Image (cartoon, helix red, strand yellow):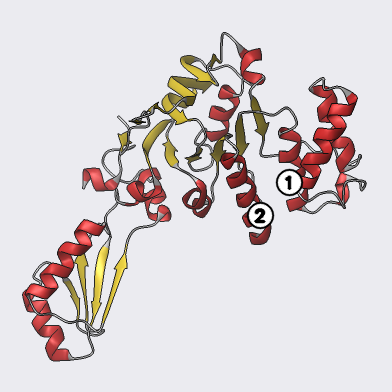
Amino acid sequence: MPFSVMSMSSSSEVGPVPVAVSAVGLRKSYGDKTVLDGVDLRIPAGSVFALLGPNGAGKTTVVKILSTLISGDGGQAQVGGHDVAASPDAVRGVIGVTGQFSAVDGLITGEENMLLMADLHHLPKAEGRRVAGELLERFDLVEAAKKPAASYSGGMKRRLDIAMTLVGGPRIIFLDEPTTGLDPRARHTMWGIIRELVTGGVTVFLTTQYLEEADELADHIAVLHDGRIAAEGTADQLKRLVPGGHVRLRFTDPTAYRTAAAALTDATDDDESLTLRIPSDGSQHDLRTVLDRLDTARIHADELTVHTPDLDDVFFALTTDDHNQPNQPKAAVR
């Protein structure tokens, strides 16, 4: 069973949050290779959901099934309130998809790419020109609009790609590794675009191998491994799944260091650097407990730092097969 640290069907005084994407038991095989082996998802509307996983984990397969590009072998899925298998046309009417490889035609201009998408969405000519112009301005592509798209930088092509996806006004957007190959500046620009989309009420389903990207953008993260969801939750919740968090105390006075080491019997000591490491999950409650212990023992360190595992630690812990129970976080099986 996947390790879930948070229910996605939260509710408040104003009622439950609408669900944009849901899946139960999604399965897909290619020949004798099982790619998806019972994937469950529940994504609230107006949020960013990030699906992480190593190469070949099945991230793109999930996107293709949910966007009606391929059929699953089992399970059920709904997107925008429509059944993916029974009502694929209705699903296509509420989604936009930006794949790993750009759909931009480099032989025509950016503006012509936009107008082509407007035609494919059967927009009237005047409406198509208006929408294309607004999106080109929104994505800072006005100056390049009359130039062949082949002359665009990687970041400009990716912005044009997403602008083309938005021509039909989708409520749900699938972004399959949208920043792969972009330089850091272009990647940060893309992050701003994604945040802006969500502010406007769009739901974003993001696959990525950049863990910093998921940490920066996602309201909820799931890690896919061996065809199953290995764990899911917010970034902070996932970080608390793996061991290694600690409070580090550094001393300049050897006597104070030895006194502290004698009082903190659960701490790991380093005589050479005069430091102690106290296990901690990094939460506010746990840190307060550590500080209270220091006050009670009259310990005054010269430097105190808090270390919590990052998403890199989580990713490696959840997707490494050298532990006894695959698909379980190390923190749950140690």
Give coordinates of residue 139: x percent, y percent.
75, 47
Q: Residue at x 88, y 46 (%)?
A: 145
Q: Gap in Å between the C-alphas at discs 1 and 2?
A: 9 Å
Tag 1: amino acid: Arg
**Residue on which the image places disc 2:** 189
Q: Hey, what amino acid is under mark 2?
A: Thr
Q: Tell me residue 124's x, y (percent).
A: 86, 22
- Which residue position is annotated with label 1? 159
Q: In the image, residue 247 lies at what x, y percent?
A: 24, 68
Residue plotted at (37% across, 37% down): 230
**271 lies above or below 243:** below
In the rendered view, does 208 fall on the left or right side of 1? right
Residue at the location (22% across, 43% down)?
A: 333
- Callout 2 crowding tier (Cα within 10 Å): few <14, some 14–19, many ≥20: some
163 displayed left or right of 22: right
The image quadrant that residue 40 belongs to is: top left
Q: Which comes before the other along the chain, label 1 or label 2?
A: 1
* Residue toward you, 30 or 5: 5
Mark number displayed over residue 88: none
Q: Residue sitting at 43 percent across and 54 percent down? A: 312
Q: Secondary structure at mark 2?
A: helix
> Are circles 1 and 2 on residues that touch, CB within 8 Å?
yes
